[in-house]
Amino acid sequence: MLCSWGIKGKMEHLTQFFVYSNLPPHLQEVSKPFCDLAEHVVRTLPANAERDEALRKLLEAKDCAVRANLCKPSTTVEASGTTFSRETVRALIEQINEAVADGVTLRCRDS
């Protein structure tokens, strides 16, 4: 079983959250290095509050990495407190590029 280790064959409380066999293959690939490092932490560090904190922070990092892999691209861009759709931003960039190609000098106006 993937990442089902623990001290004396018994899984410790925090280590259960590093198990990744329940995840689809593309997320197992993301999660496995965190499981391996958690195993190293449990096997090499003394059991105390600091080790538990290290495992909690590693778990938080693992969760963020898995979510990053699941994250859908944003459909908006925020600039100067205003939100624009990606399509609007692309159209503006295209207009700017065309103007620059035509020799137009662009200047930023003071706010």
Image: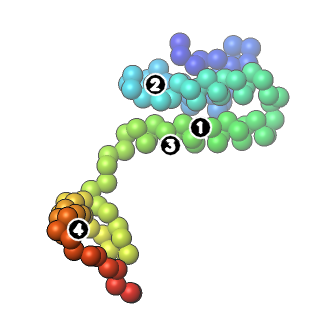
Spatial CA distance of label 4 from label 3 is: 40 Å
Can you give x and y, in whole percent of width and height, for residue 109 in the image?
Answer: 34, 84
Residue pictured at 69% horizontal, 13% vertical: 9
Q: Is residue 56 left or right of residue 110?
A: right
Can you give x and y, in whole percent of width and height, for residue 107 in the image?
Answer: 32, 79
Secondary structure under tag 2 reads helix
Spatial CA distance of label 1 from label 4 is: 48 Å
Secondary structure under tag 4 reads helix
Quick one: label 3 or label 2, which is nearer the N terminus? 2
Quick one: label 1 or label 4, which is nearer the N terminus? 1
Amino acid type indicated by mark 1: Leu
Please state which of the two labelled residues, at mark 2 or mark 1, is closer to the viewer: 2
Can you give x and y, in whole percent of width and height, for residue 84 in the image?
Answer: 26, 67
Which image quarter holds the C terminus? bottom left
Which residue is label 1 attached to?
59
Amino acid type indicated by mark 3: Cys
Which residue is label 2 attached to?
29
Spatial CA distance of label 4 from label 2 is: 44 Å
